[in-house]
Image (spheres, rainbow, N blue to C red):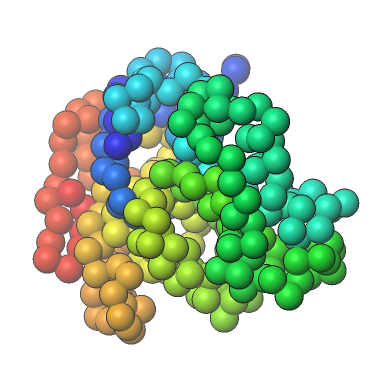
Amino acid sequence: MIEINSLAFAYPHTSPLFEILSLELSRGETWAILGPSGCGKTTLLYLLAGLRQPTDGKIQIDGEVLTRPRPHTGLILQDYGLLPWSTVRENVSLGLRLRKFYGPDGTHTPDNYLPKDNADHWLDRLGISEVADKFPAQISGGQRQRTAIARTLALEPDLLLMDEPFSSLDAITREDLQNLTLSLCAEQNLTLVIVTHAIEEAVSLGKKILLLGNPPNQNSRIFENPQAEGVNHRNSQAYHDLCALLWKEMQTPSPLSSHDPSSSLRAGRRGGIR
C-alpha cells in the first residue's frame, strides 16, 4: 500500500531527520513508530499524511505519488483536534459536512463518494451516544479520544495515522482504547500507523515496529511482532522479551551501517530486528 523510496527530509536551516530512507507497508498491517524525542517520529507521520513534502525521494500510496493530503487517509492528533464550541455529535459529523460541501472532487472528497450520515452509527460503536450533546470540555479524556476516532472512521479511511493518541490517558482507559483501536482496524481492514514514545504501547499495538534513532535516519530498523493483538499478549514471555530488546536497542546506536540502507538483520521467532 505505502512505498517510501529514498526519503530525505530536513526542516529549513537544520540537519536532516531522514536520508535515503526506504520502507514498505502493506494494506491491513499495524505499525508502531518508536524512538527518542526529536528523532522524527511525528514528522514521518506528517509526511505519510501529505502535510509535509520530502526534501528528496518520494512516498507512494496505492501507486500514486503523495503530493498533498489524500481523502482516504485519517489523521488523529495527540490533542484530539476537537472544536470546543461544537458538541460531540457535531464534531463527529464535521468531516461529513465538509465532504457534502465539496462534493466528490477527488481532492477533498473521494471521487466516488456518496453522501451518507453515519455519525450516529459511530457514536454508538464508540460508546459515546450518551454524551453526544455535550461539549468537549464536559467529557473525559477517554471520551474525547473516542470522539476523535469516531469522527475519523465516519469518513471511511483506508489508512489511519495516530500521533501519540493515548499518552494523556490513565492506564485502564489507555489499554481499553488500544484494544478498541485494534478491533476497529481489523473490522475495517485499515492500515494503522501509530507514533508512540512508549515501548510497551509499541509492542501492544504494532505487528511491525519501526525504531528510529538519532538523526539522520537512513536505515529501516524493523522489529517483527507477530503475536500482537493476540489474546493475553501483554502477559506473554514474547511480549516482555521484545520490550527488553527494544529497550536495549534504544540505549545503543543502530548496529547497521549508516551508509548501507540495504543492510538488514532477520527476525527471530519471537520477534526482533529484520
Q: Name above or below for residue 224 compared with residue 101.
A: below
Q: Name above or below for residue 99 compared with residue 65.
A: below
The quadrant of the picture occupied by the N terminus is: top left
Q: Residue at x 24, y 74 (%)?
A: 238
Query: Residue 175: x, y in percent?
Result: 51, 75
Residue 110 appears in the picture as rendered:
yes
| Of 55 and 67, the residue lying toward us | 67
Residue 38 appears in the picture as rendered:
no
| Of 92 and 104, the residue lying toward us | 104
Q: Name above or below for residue 95 compared with residue 31.
A: above
Query: Residue 156: x, y in percent?
Result: 49, 47
Q: Name above or below for residue 188 compared with residue 237.
A: above
Q: Residue furthest right?
A: 85
**Left-right relation of 255 to 69:** left
Query: Residue 11: x, y in percent?
Result: 57, 23
Counting every numbered tag in the picture gives 0
| Of 84 and 202, the residue lying toward us | 84
**Left-right relation of 270 to 228:** left
Question: Quarter of the image holding residue 261?
Answer: top left
Q: Residue at x 36, y 78 (%)?
A: 234
Query: Residue 103: x, y in percent?
Result: 61, 28
**Left-right relation of 193 to 252:** right
Q: Residue at x 21, y 53 (%)?
A: 273
Q: Residue at x 39, y 56 (%)?
A: 188
